[in-house]
Image: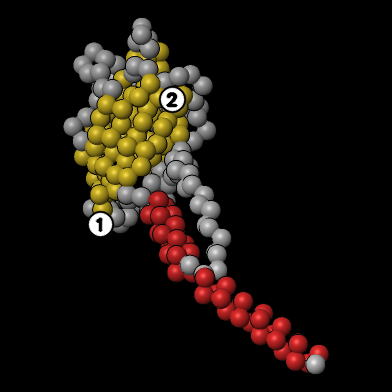
Amino acid sequence: MKKIVILGLILITTSIIQAQKASAYSVTLTDFGGRDTEVTLDITQTSTSKVQVNAQVSSGIADIQGLFFNFTNILTSSDLKVTGTDVTKVAYNNDAVVDLGNGVTMQGTSTTFDLGVKIGTSGIGKDDIQSTSFTIESLTGKAVDFDLTSGFGARLTSVGANRQESRKLVGTYTPPVVPTVVLPTAVPEPTTFLLVGVGILGLMGLRKKMMR
């Protein structure tokens, strides 16, 4: 029974560690003004120094203009390489990126970013990008590790059925809830009951001898 309990604890601990070190996760960005447009980021850590980002408008309709990120460590612009078909501009400045120009800005969200990635062209005259993907890589081998608590951002234009509105979305990563596992109470094995019974009988016999 003790072996079963110990094995259960090991399995639970391993599951928690794997959840904390997940190589792939999703972040949902919601409208800063409380409206219903959403963007989902599916992020895969392909190596310590490289991540794959897949972004899509998951609620509503909009043209993705820019995506914004924060890192846990300080990098430099020469460290980073952002590669993607729709990427048209990259700006890196530790805790100071809010505006990529031509209206691709996160001003007013009270959040600053380390990295901004401009997607496509302004408006939907030449493109209407509702999903995109790219990689972010450190050319010097440094860790590319997003800060999951300080926030991600997205700038959208041509929003809604009339394609006349715009949005600024923000969001943070919410880790999955690890279910609580109640371990069974250890039940004494039959051998234990036998030994206890023999012990009690022995004490009773000794008591009778002493009474005589």
Viewer-proximal residue among 186 and 81: 186
Q: In the image, which disc is placed on residue 72?
A: none
- Amino acid carrying label 2: it is Lys
Residue 12 image point, x, y percent: 44, 57
Residue 87 image point, x, y percent: 24, 32
Picture quarter with the C terminus: bottom right
Q: Residue at x 51, y 70 (%)?
A: 189
Q: Residue at x 76, y 87 (%)?
A: 207
Q: Give the left or right position of residue 112, taking residue 115 as reference.
A: right
Q: Quadrant of residue 130?
A: top left
Above-or-below relation of 140 to 71 = below
Residue picked out by circle 2: 168
Viewer-proximal residue among 71 and 180: 180
| Mark before the other along the chain sequence, 2 or 1 | 1
What element does badge 2 sit on?
A: strand
Residue 17 image point, x, y percent: 41, 57
Question: Whole-Å distance between the Cαs marked 2 and 1?
Answer: 32 Å
Q: Residues within 10 Å of mark 1 (few under 14, many from 20)?
A: few
Q: Quadrant of residue 192?
A: bottom right
Viewer-proximal residue among 176 and 195: 195
Q: In the image, which disc is placed on residue 140?
A: 1
Q: Give the left or right position of residue 25, taking residue 211 as reference.
A: left
Above-or-below relation of 190 to 69 = below
Residue 101 visible in the shown view: no
- Amino acid carrying label 1: it is Thr
Q: Residue at x 72, y 89 (%)?
A: 206
